[in-house]
Amino acid sequence: MNGGDAYGIMEAQYIRRHHRHDIRDDQCSSALVKHVKAPVNLVWSLVRRFDQPQKYKPFVSRCIMKGDLGIGSVREVNVKSGLPATTSTERLELLDDKEHILGIKIVGGDHRLRNYSSIITVHPEVIEGRPGTMVIESFVVDVPEGNTQDETCYFVEALIRCNLKSLADVSERMAVLDQTEPINRY
């Protein structure tokens, strides 16, 4: 399932390379792509902050870290009202600053997202002659009893789309302030 998004050649290659999930029959999985008009280093500086997801995730009101920022560290996230949850406990599974890969797993909370894990990758690209970023987020999650795979994927994809749109908005505002130079100047 890909959330109705058609993948281009580059997107498909990155998904095959970085977004592998072992999926059981009682789970759903998807990958979503967002093109951001901001340089990769700026976008990555927001994505990699496991300790500050509220910088771009609009449903996060607070984040409290347990431990350092290394692999295996845990964060307690408070979720804003309007969602069917108030807290989520998440563990950092992967943080690769060279390849720009972040992996998390939800390990607790008062929600129905069981065995949820996600991978976010950011990749440089050129958009309208300027440095841009392709962001890909994939996930796998159990389908809760009483729901279908389609319903579960639709719900999670809607949250991810909102987060990716917010990431793009925040990154693009920051890029405008930095007045990023075009790649192909004449």
Image (tube, grey):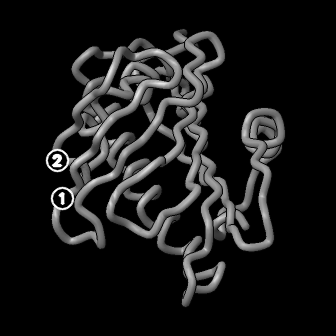
Provide the secondary structure element on which disc 2 rests.
strand
Query: Which residue does the numbered mark 1 point to in the structure image?
Result: 80
Q: Amino acid at mark 2?
A: Ser
Residue 69, disc:
none
Residue at 59% of width from left, 26% of height from top? 94
Q: Amino acid at mark 1?
A: Lys
Q: CA distance from mark 1 to mark 2?
A: 6 Å
At label 2, counting other C-alpha atoms closer than 10 Å, the crowd grade (few under 14, some 14-19, many 20 or more) is: some
Which quarter of the rendered picture does the N terminus lie within? bottom right
Q: Are marks 1 and 2 in contact (CB under 8 Å)?
A: yes
Residue at 59% of width from left, 71% of height from top? 153
Residue at 48% of width from left, 72% of height from top? 155
Q: Is residue 64 visible?
A: yes
Query: Which residue does the numbered mark 2 point to in the structure image?
Result: 61
Residue 186 in which image quadrant: top right
Q: Specify whether 10 is left or right of 42.
A: right
Q: Could you tell me how many numbered marks the image carries?
A: 2
The answer to which of 112 and 167 lies nearer the viewer is 112
